[in-house]
């Protein structure tokens, strides 16, 4: 069942990529959200606990999305009838979800460059 296996393995890297993108952007989005909610104070400036790990999170995002993209876009061998990969719309839907997740991750990872324009 190589076709079924390739489709079940694609969820983990997408979820991991989104989680890493959120982790990479927490140093900037966290204070921005707090300020947007009206929470302010000098202590917001000290919310830089994860900043040293930002490059690690960004690399993790790139690696996990690269792996997920390879899993989703590679040619699928024959599928057994009744499996998810045998349904014609399943591969296309997974590719759409993948690209939406990539766009969300890109917005989160690049947030350090565009959030200061709104603050």
Image: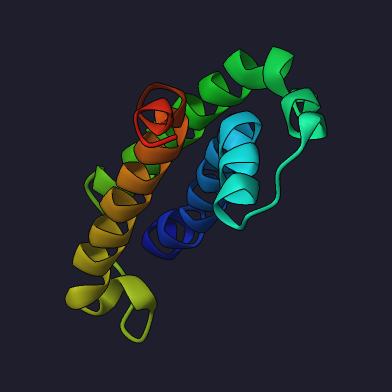
Q: Describe residue 22's horizontal placement relative to residue 72 as left or right.
A: right
Is 25 or 42 nearer to us in this picture? 42
Q: Describe residue 16's horizontal placement relative to residue 99 as left or right.
A: right
Residue at 35% x, 86% y: name it. 82
Question: Is residue 115 shown above or below 99?
Answer: above
Residue at 50% x, 31% y: name it. 61
Is 59 or 31 nearer to us in this picture? 31
The x and y percentages for residue 109 are 45, 30
Question: Is residue 15 shown above or below 17?
Answer: below
Q: Which quadrant does the C terminus fall into?
A: top left
Residue 87 visible somewhere in the drawing: yes
Residue at 76% x, 37% y: name it. 41
Residue at 24% x, 45% y: name it. 73
Q: Describe residue 57's horizontal placement relative to residue 67 as left or right.
A: right
Is 91 or 30 nearer to us in this picture? 30
The residue sitting at the bottom extreme is: 82
Q: Describe residue 46's horizontal placement relative to residue 12 as left or right.
A: right
The x and y percentages for residue 108 are 45, 38
> Coloring scheme of the render?
rainbow
The x and y percentages for residue 79 are 30, 69
Q: Which quadrant does the N terminus fall into?
A: bottom left
Is 24 or 88 nearer to us in this picture? 24
Question: Is residue 47 shown above or below 102?
Answer: above
The x and y percentages for residue 84 are 36, 77
Residue 77 visible somewhere in the drawing: no
């Amino acid at each position: 069942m190589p076709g079924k296996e390739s489709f079940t393995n694609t969820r983990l890297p997408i979820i991991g990529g989104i989680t890493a993108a959120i982790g990479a952007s927490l140093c900037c989005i966290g204070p921005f959200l707090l300020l947007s909610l009206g929470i302010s104070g000098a202590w917001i400036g000290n919310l830089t606990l994860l900043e040293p790990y930002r490059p690690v999170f960004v690399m993790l995002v790139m690696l996990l999305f690269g792996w997920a993209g390879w899993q989703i876009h590679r040619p699928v061998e024959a599928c057994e009838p009744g499996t998810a990969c045998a349904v014609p719309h399943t591969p296309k839907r997974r590719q759409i979800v993948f690209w939406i997740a990539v766009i969300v991750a890109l917005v989160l990872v690049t947030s350090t460059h565009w959030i200061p324009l709104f603050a």
